[in-house]
Image (spheres, grey):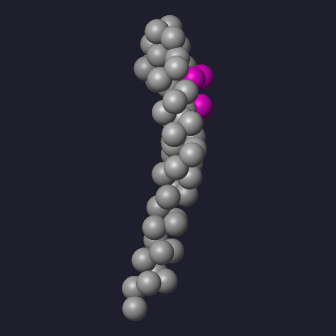
């Protein structure tokens, strides 16, 4: 999962100015794609954390 987060960050860093401006526009396809990936990772992380604490709560 850390690799996925790193890849998203690296991709954003490597964008040119035009692509970054497009990313900031909430109606753009670029924004929608990155937003979806980040939300998926957030959900995945929350499930992993919940499972960890559920199993080691004892």
Which residue shows up at 52% across the image and 20% down it? 14
Magenta segment? 29-33
Outermost residue on the bottom side: it is 58
Q: Position of residue 53 (x, y in %)?
A: 42, 77
Using residue 33 as the reference point, say whether residue 56 is left or right of it. left
Residue 27 in view here: no
- Residue at the (48%, 51%) spot, across then down: 42
Q: Check the picture and name the quadrant holding the C terminus.
A: bottom left
Nearest the camera: 50 or 8?
8
Give above or below for 51 relative to 22. Answer: below
15 is higher (above) or lower (below) than 10: above
* Residue 57 shows in this picture: yes
Q: Residue at x 57, y 23 (%)?
A: 30
**Residue ranking furthest to the left:** 57
Q: Position of residue 51 (x, y in %)?
A: 51, 74
Could you say which is closer to the camera, residue 12 or residue 32?
A: 12
Q: Is residue 41 rendered magenta in the image?
A: no
Q: Does the magenta stretch include residue 30?
A: yes
Q: How many marks?
A: 0
Q: Which residue lies furthest to the top in this view?
A: 18
Give residue 43's position: percent from left, percent from top.
52, 55
Q: Which of 33 and 53 is in front in this view?
A: 53
Q: Which residue is drawn at 46% across and 9% down?
A: 17
Above or below for 55 versus 15: below
The image position of residue 2, as x and y in percent, is: 52, 49
């Amino acid at each position: 999962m850390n690799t996925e987060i790193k890849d998203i960050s690296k991709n954003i860093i490597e964008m040119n100015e035009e692509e970054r401006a497009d990313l900031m526009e909430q109606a753009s396809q670029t924004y929608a794609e990155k937003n979806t990936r980040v939300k998926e990772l957030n959900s995945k992380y929350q499930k992993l954390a919940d499972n960890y604490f559920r199993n080691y709560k004892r």
